[in-house]
Image: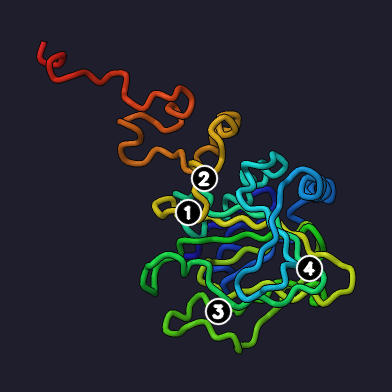
Amino acid sequence: MAKEEVIVDGVNITEHVAEIEQQGYTVLPDFLHPAEVEKIRHAFNSEVPITEMRAIGTDTGKTWRSHNLLAKTRATDHIFLDPRLRAVVEGVIGKYTQINVTTLFNTLPGETKQLLHQDDGLWPIPRPHPPFLCNALIALDDFDIENGATHLVPQSHKWHDRQVDQNVETLQIEMKSGSMLMWEGAMWHAGGANTSATRERMGLFISHQVSYLRPQEIQLISVPRDVVRKMPKKLQRLLGYHRFGLGVDGRDPIDVLADGIVVNPEAKTAEEWRD
């Protein structure tokens, strides 16, 4: 029996999730409006502390990154809660998800190609395994061959019997500013070389994982609690303040976030219970 189509804000979620299942990735064009893109670009250029990154096979220092983004700016909060993003993520890895990594990056002219890699390889879980990581990359500049559009290896998320091969043929995903590329965590991928003379390649990277895994960025301590308290409840949940098992001494972590009480107020000593 065919699945009933799910449409969210005009986007066919069912089709995009099926593409990720079949080929490992999908593209949502025009995900952000130009005004939204410019707001994020302004935040990256003016208010967000950044670092110079040499990692995954590049040593030029010509990629700027700002990790732990939700501790640094409110310019992107609405994106994490966007119903289209939420629907695709949950369609790929299930209902119980949380944020793994949040990054603004800028790939400068002269940057070299990353090594192909799998983002789900950081967890010691034998393959094959169910998808537990879903990534999103939003283009703030146009992504094309010259400025280093992302390399993907279609179908590689299903290759559980081999190590990542740096010599395999790749596909570079060209997309316009405001578009979003999403892929399953086992997909072989790499940032491309920016061979342009003057053009930068700025993007927003968001990684989600199933909520029972430890995230790469420990959101519970990396985002200050006074910042988290001002966030919408749904974003608090995505940071890891979700009700799972015993919570905090039987209480919802969001309630504890609000009042700071880590011992259940209804708890009593054994003597008090006996009286």
Q: How much space separates mark 3 and mark 4, taking CA atoms?
A: 22 Å
Left or right: residue 266 versus residue 221 is left
Q: Which residue is mark 2?
A: 219
Q: Helix, strand, or loop for circle 4?
A: loop
In the rendered structure, which amino acid carries the disc numbered 1?
Pro
Instruction: Mark yes or no: residue 72 visible.
Output: yes
Label 3 – label 1 distance at C-alpha: 25 Å
Pick the front one: 92 or 61:
61
Q: Do the residues under discs 4 and 1 have CB atoms within 8 angstroms?
A: no
Q: Secondary structure at mark 3?
A: loop
The residue lying at 48 percent from left, 41 percent from top is: 220
Which picture quadrant has residue 232?
Answer: top right
Sequence-first disc among 3 and 2: 3
Categorize mark 3 by other alpha carbons within 10 Å: few (<14), some (14-19), many (20+). Answer: some
The three-letter amino acid code for the residue at tag 2 is Gln
Q: Which residue is mark 1?
A: 215
Quick one: label 3 or label 1, which is nearer the N terminus? 3
Q: x, y percentage for residue 74?
A: 69, 39
**Labels 1 and 2 touching (C-beta < 8 A):** yes
Q: Residue extending furthest left?
A: 274
